[in-house]
Image (spheres, grey):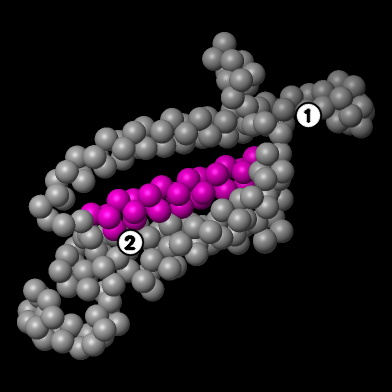
Amino acid sequence: MWENLWSKYLQFQGNWIEETRGTLMLVATVIATMTFQSTISPPGGVWQENTHTGGLNCTTYGICEAGTAVLAYAWPHEFVQSMTYNTTSFFSSLGVVLLLISGFPIKNKVMMWVLTMAMTIAVTFMALTYVFAQGLVTPYHIIQTYFSMAHPLVVAWGILLLVFGLIHTLRLVFWVKKRTKMKHKLPGRLALHGSGREILAKL
């Protein structure tokens, strides 16, 4: 019953990825551009010249070098985490672009699932990059207010991701199950009727 309900209302709607190929390419390119820009222009800016006294931790590290991120010295752990999210989003979006221009048959359900998951990862980690970058540039006396506002939004996004990922994964599982059943039934039909062309035409 559940499988029939799923197949009726939540099955893949045609070749929607093929129909929206140009849009996917545009979105993936925009995400790659945004994440690349946030790397060369990090939140908080960069040091304009070498300094020993320009920041709180310049004396600890010996020198704050020109062209390096200011916040990498003030909040090194949080900065690395933000850049990790940013890099993940960047390469996920590039992966989508590569798949779209590679010539692989994206009508295939497996390829559709891979593209969907890659875009989901790119968008999710871009959102996490924003949350951490905003936290890095928020003044300390209101940082708790910011995180109390951002926390429920992150939780809501996580719930949406779980539902979204479950739906698409179950779609793929049911599709594989259906294909497996068809492969098992086909040899028996061929043996009974003796004509493969007629069976294939009906399928």
| Residue occupying image coordinates x 38% and y 73% | 40
The residue identified by callout 2 is 84
Q: Where is residue 5 shown, x and y percent of the image?
A: 59, 15
| Mark 2 closeness class: few <14, some 14–19, many ≥20 residues within 10 Å | some
| Residue occupying image coordinates x 30% and y 51% | 131
The residue identified by callout 1 is 187
Residue 121 among those drawn in magenta: yes
Residue 122 among those drawn in magenta: yes
- Give the CA separation, mark 1 to mark 2: 51 Å
Q: Determine the secondary structure under disc 1.
A: helix
In this view of the protein, which residue sits in the foreground, 179 or 70? 70
- With respect to residue 164, does 53 lie above or below? below
| Residue occupying image coordinates x 24% and y 40% | 149
Which numbered mark, 1 or 2, is in the foreground of this view?
Answer: 2
Q: In which quadrant will I find the C terminus?
A: top right
Under mark 2, the amino acid is Thr
In this view of the protein, which residue sits in the foreground, 137 or 201? 137
Location of residue 157 (image quadrant): top left
Under mark 1, the amino acid is Pro
Q: Where is residue 102 shown, x and y percent of the image?
A: 67, 61
